[in-house]
């Protein structure tokens, strides 16, 4: 349900409202805290978070009022049910212990091992019904309906401590307190720490320095030596009590309270309003749970949001604009100046004096709208549509006769003080006024070479002249003359100007921050480039460093080495453009004013923040082939994935990092370039087999970046790519193929041999009958046996010219002719016997005649006048013709006569007889009919 929740800032808080919340260095200074809220809204029905469990450097586990568990990685919310087949029953309690999440569902205890992404049920006995769980650094304590169990670190084995039924378990620093029917018990020792009174219904318990704090429906009770010593927040339902170095945090149904020690160690509780624009920036009134981290950071859930506060926020002094103007709406700060030991803040028609801790000391409401304010000669000078006014800084009352009559009823847009005078801007017109001598100079509206030039900033160097930052670039004023030094095309619109100890001008412009030598010998150098991701909002110089406040944090540039350090800040996009942001260094502290008020941070704290490590990315969750696979963990080396897996990785960054750019590279693919994404979600499709390493490039202090491994992956090769399987498969398939074709060939050959034998016998029978028929007609004297034994001779289709001429030959010639006749009869007889064999060839016949194949082919041509092939085809076709005349099937005839291909038989038959076998058989059938 939390997957759609997103962190936000209602408006940009000049970044500084959140920059301290990113630091992890636990520096404790007593001051008001600043919370940061992650709204739990955005779904059709949002549920309140009733239990928060923090895992350092990993994330936060959340249990809502409907029994659903989610994990927050600093950017995304992940529902645990998407990654595990959870029990169908609602989850009632959760506890983060020993790198695992333990929870109760249907009165049974479950353990989710984050590293192995495995869920197991912990056996406690068939009759044990789990009521509550809590943890300390050594044990997970499990209370059932009849016994108390404990599970040591690095095991899942529960040790039964005997009959000690407890309804609730409360975590208190490094110990656990149990609630029985009649008392509170220290589960470590089994000793009673407080006997319950009839009027106390305990909802929470916390032990601190030997004293016990009890939260109940009736308020907060302080128990000392087993007896109630004090009663606070009467008639307030107290849900949770936690303690940090700042004080005692008490969460109730009516808000958050902070208890701090005052004189005589008396504790006083301050109610925190629960509004995002108050001194604490807490979002929500009803407090469900408070979770503290090891370094003093706080996670707090309300009906509106999950809130976070860094320990560094304790060092921030804040004066919210809401305190100045409760109905401020879209009002913004117009000016902030320092005079003596006080700060003066103006917004709309109100003016407030603040001390060094930003506590208001005096305020007033004027009958004019303050456009701008400056301090000169121990006076406050106000620019408004009514003209120029002077105020007493102590009384905040107007001083009469301080402004020149020439400016009466002249609308002043901007007043800028230098060391001796005031520069006044009225539209495009510029005045210079010396209050001490009451001298006024009107430079008119054509003081610049460029028409309609707006004066924005002044840097007076006394006898060296005055530098002017304008909407058209950098100008220089000396001895009554204005000169254009840098045009707007080169540096943009100038917002402020400062000078360092080396006579370098530093200019904040719409394009960023430039450094420029006053003698003009070197072109302006862009030190910080404002882009869409980080825009410079204000700039200030100290003795040794330059500070640039941006929309993403604060950059510090060392003036000696130009090494950059960085404090990460807010990066949320905003739909409302911020009107004005101001910053300055006073009293060894940096002040930043923005839309939500003024913030002050000491240089000591700034240095600590700049030296603190920047937030690092982590794995929030991993999805494989579109399905949630596992939540992130601390050990993500050699993760095994199936072949051709598509991988989606959610990148987390605690405590929050929404909309931050991520530079990444996947080593192991052909593309080794760095890529950038802003949605904290990396997608890799159809990964080939092999080993991959996901690299992240992150900024580090000093203006550099570091590369580190985030996860290593092993994508398995498909089975057909594995060499052993491939060889076995090839060999097996080859042997199977050979066996199949051999068997098929043997079967076909056996069938054809049988068929040819049968048909050949039929042909012989036909010849025998024809010869018997001739004998019965007196046309021959051969017997049946002679006919059977005589080889079949070709019919008239093969013409054998064996006649002799009438000439008288010699004996030698006669013998030669006889030998030739016998050879021809022998050759044709062999063909007549073997014509049905498809493999019959000249080689076979040559061996039968005891001559070479070449001699056979030559003698065939000489003796018979045609080739062996022509004689064989002629014999086959002649026999086929006789079989067709008997009505045999064409396929059988083709096979019986030695033709392996029926199509070749048909083609040869038609070439010789002028008709196809089927046409010839139809003709024979019609004649018989």
Image: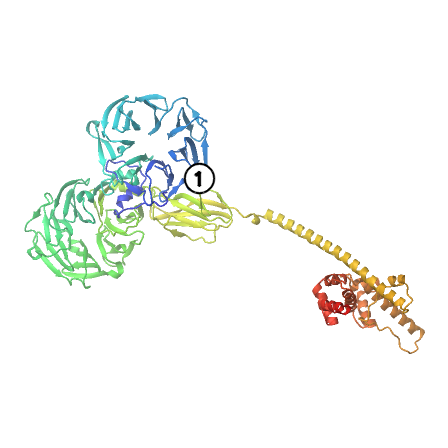
Tell which of 523 and 57 is nearer to you.
57
In the rendered structure, the answer to whether residue 322 lies left or right of residue 114 reads left
Dot 1: within a 10 Å radius of its alpha carbon, few (fewer than 14), some, or many (20 or more) residues?
A: some
Residue 211 position within the rendered picture, expressed as x and y whole percent measured from the top left: 28, 25
Quarter of the image with the N terminus is: top left
Tell which of 568 and 560 is nearer to you.
568
432 w.r.t. 325: above or below? below
In the rendered structure, the answer to whether residue 504 lies left or right of residue 663 reads left
Where residue 873 sits, quadrant-wise, is: bottom right
Where residue 834 sits, quadrant-wise, is: bottom right
Q: Which residue is mark 1?
A: 84
Tell which of 850 and 109 is nearer to you.
109
Where residue 875 sits, quadrant-wise, is: bottom right
760 w.r.t. 735: above or below? below
In the rendered structure, the answer to whether residue 411 lies left or right of residue 667 reads left
Residue 754 position within the rendered picture, expressed as x and y whole percent measured from the top left: 77, 56
Residue 116 position within the rendered picture, expressed as x and y whole percent measured from the top left: 46, 38
Find numbered disc 1 in the image and state the secondary structure of the residue it sits on.
Answer: loop
């Amino acid at each position: 349900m939390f997957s759609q929740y997103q962190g936000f800032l209602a408006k940009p808080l000049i970044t500084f409202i959140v920059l301290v919340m990113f630091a992890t260095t636990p520096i404790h200074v007593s001051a008001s805290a600043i919370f940061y809220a992650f709204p739990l809204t955005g779904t059709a029905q949002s549920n309140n978070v009733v239990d928060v469990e923090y895992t350092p450097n990993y994330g936060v586990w959340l249990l809502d009022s409907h029994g659903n568990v989610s994990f927050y990685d600093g950017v995304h919310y992940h529902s645990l049910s998407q990654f595990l087949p959870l029990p169908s029953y609602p989850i009632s309690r959760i506890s983060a212990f020993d790198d695992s999440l333990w929870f109760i569902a249907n009165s049974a205890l479950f353990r989710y091992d984050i590293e192995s992404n495995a869920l197991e049920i912990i056996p406690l006995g068939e009759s044990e019904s789990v009521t509550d769980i809590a943890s300390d650094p050594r044990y997970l304590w499990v209370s059932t309906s009849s016994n108390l169990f404990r599970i040591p670190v690095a095991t899942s084995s529960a040790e039964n401590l005997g009959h000690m039924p407890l309804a609730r378990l409360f975590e208190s620093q490094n110990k656990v307190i149990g609630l029985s029917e009649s008392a509170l018990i220290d589960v470590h020792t089994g000793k009673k720490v407080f006997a319950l009174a009839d009027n106390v219904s305990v909802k929470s318990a916390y032990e601190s320095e030997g004293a016990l704090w009890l939260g109940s429906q009736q308020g907060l009770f302080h128990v000392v030596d087993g007896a109630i010593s004090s009663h606070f927040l009467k008639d307030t339902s107290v849900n949770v009590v936690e303690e940090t170095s700042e004080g005692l945090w008490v969460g109730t149904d009516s808000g958050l309270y902070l208890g701090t020690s005052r004189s005589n160690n008396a504790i006083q509780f301050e109610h925190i309003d629960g509004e995002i624009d108050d001194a604490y920036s807490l979002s929500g009134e009803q407090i469900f749970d408070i979770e503290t981290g090891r370094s003093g950071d706080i996670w707090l859930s309300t009906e509106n949001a999950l809130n976070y506060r860094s320990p560094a926020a304790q060092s921030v002094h804040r004066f919210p604009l809401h305190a100045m103007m409760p109905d401020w709406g879209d009002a913004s700060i117009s000016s902030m100046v320092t005079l003596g030991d006080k700060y003066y803040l103006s917004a709309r028609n109100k003016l407030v004096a603040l001390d060094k801790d930003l506590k208001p000391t005096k305020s007033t409401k004027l009958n004019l709208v303050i456009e701008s304010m400056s301090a000169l000669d121990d006076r406050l000078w106000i620019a408004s549509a009514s003209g120029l006014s002077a105020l007493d800084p102590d009384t905040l009352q107007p001083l009469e006769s301080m402004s020149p009559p020439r400016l009466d009823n002249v609308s002043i847009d901007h007043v800028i003080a230098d060391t001796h005078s005031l520069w006044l801007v009225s539209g495009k017109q510029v005045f210079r006024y010396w209050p001490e001598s009451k001298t006024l100079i009107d430079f008119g509206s054509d003081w610049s070479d460029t028409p309609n030039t707006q004066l924005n900033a002044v840097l007076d160097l006394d006898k060296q002249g005055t530098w002017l930052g304008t909407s058209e670039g950098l100008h220089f004023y000396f001895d009554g003359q204005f000169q254009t030094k840098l045009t707007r095309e080169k540096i943009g619109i100038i917002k402020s100007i400062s000078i360092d100890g080396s006579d370098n001008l530093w200019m904040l412009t719409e394009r960023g921050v430039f450094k420029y030598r006053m003698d003009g010998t070197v072109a302006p150098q862009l030190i910080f480039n404002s882009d869409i991701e980080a825009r410079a909002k204000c700039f200030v110089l100290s003795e040794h460093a330059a500070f640039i406040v941006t929309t993403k944090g604060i950059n510090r540039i060392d003036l000696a080495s130009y090494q950059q350090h960085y404090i990460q800040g807010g990066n949320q996009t905003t739909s409302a453009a911020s009107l004005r942001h101001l910053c300055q260094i006073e009293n060894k502290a940096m002040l930043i004013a923005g839309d939500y008020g003024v913030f002050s941070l000491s240089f000591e704290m700034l240095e600590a923040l700049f030296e603190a490590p920047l937030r690092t990315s982590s794995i929030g969750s991993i999805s494989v082939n579109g399905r949630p696979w596992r939540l992130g963990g601390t050990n993500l080396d050699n993760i095994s994935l199936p072949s051709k897996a598509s991988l989606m990785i959610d990148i987390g960054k605690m405590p929050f990092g929404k909309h931050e750019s991520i530079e990444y590279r996947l080593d192991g693919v052909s593309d080794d370039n760095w890529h950038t994404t802003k949605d904290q979600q990396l997608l890799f499709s159809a990964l080939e087999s092999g080993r991959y390493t996901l690299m992240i490039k992150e900024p580090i202090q000093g203006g550099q970046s570091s590369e580190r491994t985030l996860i290593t992956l092993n994508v398995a090769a498909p089975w057909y790519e594995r060499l052993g399987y491939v060889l076995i498969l090839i060999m097996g398939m080859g042997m199977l193929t050979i066996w199949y074709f051999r068997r098929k060939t043997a079967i076909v050959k056996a069938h054809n041999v049988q068929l040819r034998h049968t048909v050949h016998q039929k042909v012989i029978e036909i010849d025998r009958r024809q010869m018997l028929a001739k004998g019965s007609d007196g046309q021959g004297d051969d017997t049946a046996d002679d006919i059977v034994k005589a080889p079949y001779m070709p019919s008239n289709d093969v013409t054998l010219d064996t006649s002799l001429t009438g000439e008288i030959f010699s004996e030698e010639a006669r013998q030669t002719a006889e030998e030739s006749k016998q050879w021809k009869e022998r050759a044709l007889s062999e063909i007549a016997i073997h014509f049905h064999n498809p493999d019959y060839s000249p080689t076979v016949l040559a061996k039968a005649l005891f001559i070479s194949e070449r001699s056979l082919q030559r003698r065939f041509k000489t003796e018979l006048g045609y080739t062996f092939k022509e004689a064989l085809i002629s014999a086959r076709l002649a026999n086929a013709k006789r079989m067709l005349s008997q009505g045999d099937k064409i396929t059988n005839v083709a096979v019986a006569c030695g033709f392996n291909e029926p199509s070749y038989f048909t083609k040869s038959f038609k070439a010789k007889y002028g008709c196809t076998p089927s046409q010839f058989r139809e003709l024979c059938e019609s004649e018989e009919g």
